[in-house]
Image: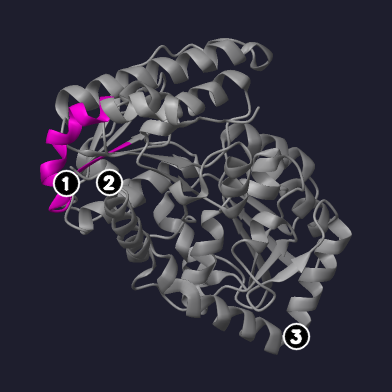
Amino acid sequence: MELAWDSDQIGPWRARLAIGFDRLAAMEMGPQQLVVVANTRIPSQRAQSLQVMHAGQAFVDRGLSTTLLHAKRRGTTVLGQGALSTYYGLPSDSQLRVEAVSCVDGIDSVPTCLQFLPARLQEWTFASRAAKRVDAQFPDALVLTREIETAYRLKPRPGIFWEVHRVPGGRWRRGLMARAMPALAGVIAISGGVQDDLVRLGVPESKILVEHDAFHSQRFEGLPGKAAARKRLSLSADAQLVVYTGGLLAWKGVEILVQAAAQMPDVDFVIVGGMDADVKRLRGLAAGLPNVHLLGFLDPGQVPLYLVAGDVGVVPNRSQPAISSRYTSPLKVFEAMAIGLPLVVSDLPSMRDILSDEDACFVPPDDPNSLVQGLRRVFSDSKLRQRLGICLSRRAQQHTFDARAVRLLDWMQSHLPRTP
């Protein structure tokens, strides 16, 4: 389905946008308020919540009064502002306001095979209620939403930006995108693959900025050296150590990593992260492999220690689906940059979008034998490990959430509509 609009279609939107020009007076001097909308649990075991919290804090650090609206989901532990800051490694006096928005949430009460309609209901009720709150409480704020439904409900309000991590695949959602697009000030694509598919669907390239994920630099300050980190974590001082940090969804390829570990009994593999059900599934696969240590989800503050302790990091994404091969921008890649951890990664467009042969060792996806060969190559060549680590470290400062926020705000400001 191609999105197309002509001057007759855009004209009415321009007329309606004129209604909101009075809101732009403050924006033209530089926006002072930002609302981030994300349909995520907070706190949760998913990287999405970490990303939105750290991105939000970076906007606060740039001087914006920032509020994050997230979904109030069933069964989620409620933490106060201070506890949330500690949990996500934010400053103890963080001024990021985090507010839950109610939604109809029956997803987990039905079997997985029946969750499609409850999930759509949850998404729509959250998005529409978040839009109502934005209009009622933040009439002059910039809006950065990850939900196209919220963007649609907020039109024709000016200053709406859509951050896209996965291109809408369904006909209904693409229709919403087509109707919302003329009113959007801009679109932030998390990867080049997202941008390419949006352009293919008819979104003007001039309206899109590619901004990958990043890392929260404060989490990587004051870390010990490798030996001290291993001692603190009770890891072998002299073992060859591969570290994986992140989610355990099937497309992330951790099963491939476990299969590779079975062929490398002389190397230790530490896997940190994942939802409880995924951890249980992988523990069954790794049964009988004493060199595989599945630690499950840990406090986010512990993750940098494991990265420091490792010799090599790994990103074994599968070639399918598109979120893996084209769209993803993994936090683990940027966190490896933060400490200069050499990486072995699947050779996919999503990885090539971030890294080059100077930065990482690429291996064919979906193949444990190829992953073993890549890991053996990096372990056997100390000069290669050193070069990869140095190249990653040199890029780190470009990929902090602070640097990302500066670029985003400059671009967003340049894309705000101007009064006649």
Q: CA distance from mark 2 to mark 1?
A: 8 Å
Q: CA distance from mark 3 to mark 2?
A: 51 Å
Labelled disc at residue 27 = 1
SS for callout 2: loop
**Pointer 3: what residue?**
381
**Pointer 2: what residue?**
416
Q: Main secondary structure of the magenta part?
A: helix
Q: Quadrant of the N terminus?
A: top right
Q: Which of pointers 2 and 1 lies earlier in the amino acid sequence?
A: 1
Give the left or right position of residue 353, taking residue 127 as reference: right
The image position of residue 59, as x and y in percent, is 26, 53
Count of numbered circles on the image: 3
State the residue in front, 400 or 210: 210
Give the left or right position of residue 204, taking residue 13 as reference: right
Q: CA distance from mark 3 to mark 1?
A: 54 Å
Q: Which of pointers 3 and 2 lies earlier in the amino acid sequence?
A: 3
Q: Quadrant of residue 248?
A: top right
Who's the residue at 29% across and 59% down the image? Answer: 410
